[in-house]
């Protein structure tokens, strides 16, 4: 009986430790995965830089890494704007309206085959 009780306690401790490790891992990931700055925040960053604030102070103000504010300032100095650069890639095939329609179709019928819903956009790839 005593051995059985010890094994139950050991299993319980193992489960608790695994939970703590997973929780700490999630916290660490959430700390290092920061959200993107909005365009308003990006413009405020440039305004603070032009006003004479250091890049580190700007990063502390917006809660981002100092390299984020450095890259943003470098992009502004190079292009004259804070907007994202144009990225290469295949042009979008569907419009926002078609995307919304496809989403609604698949939310209404979760087992709808994609071949059925892609018919309105067939042949647009060329």
Image (cartoon, helix red, strand yellow):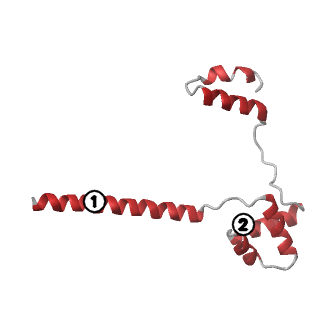
Which residue is painted at 73% across and 73% down in the image?
61
Q: State how far apart marks 1 and 2 are (Cα).
A: 43 Å
Q: Which residue lies at the image location 61% right of the left edge and 27% below the top edge?
A: 108
User: Is 5 placed left or right of 42 in the picture?
Assistant: left
Residue at image location 64% in from the left, 62% down from the top = 34
Q: Which mark is residue 68?
A: 2
The residue furthest left is 1
Q: Mark 1 points at which residue?
A: 12
Depicted 9 relative to depicted 96: above or below = below
Q: Are marks 1 and 2 in contact (CB under 8 Å)?
A: no
User: In the figure, residue 124 lies in which quadrant?
Assistant: top right
Secondary structure of the residue carrying numbered label 2 = helix
Residue 47: percent from left, percent from top: 86, 71
- Nearer the observer, 121 or 123: 121
Q: Is residue 57 left or right of residue 116?
A: right
For residue 111, above or below residue 23: above
Q: Which of marks 1 and 2 is in front?
A: 1
Left or right, residue 80 beside residue 16: right
Quadrant assignment for the N terminus: bottom left
Q: Is mark 1 on a helix, strand or loop?
A: helix
What is the x, y in percent for residue 31? 57, 65
Specify the quadrant that holds the C terminus. top right
Residue 112: percent from the left, percent from the top? 59, 23
Q: Nearer the viewer, residue 103 or 31?
A: 103
**Vertical placement of residue 112 versus 91, above or below:** above
């Amino acid at each position: 009986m005593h051995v059985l009780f010890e094994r139950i306690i050991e299993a319980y401790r193992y489960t608790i430790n695994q939970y703590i490790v997973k929780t700490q891992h999630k916290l660490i990931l959430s700390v290092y995965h920061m959200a993107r700055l909005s365009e308003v925040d990006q413009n405020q960053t440039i305004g603070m830089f032009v006003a004479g604030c250091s890049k580190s102070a700007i990063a502390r103000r917006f809660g981002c890494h100092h390299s984020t504010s450095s890259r943003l300032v470098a992009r502004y100095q190079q292009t004259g704007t804070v907007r994202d650069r144009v990225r290469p890639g295949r042009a979008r095939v569907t419009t926002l309206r078609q995307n919304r329609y496809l989403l609604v179709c698949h939310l209404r019928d979760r087992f709808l085959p994609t071949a059925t819903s892609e018919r309105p956009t067939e042949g647009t790839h060329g």
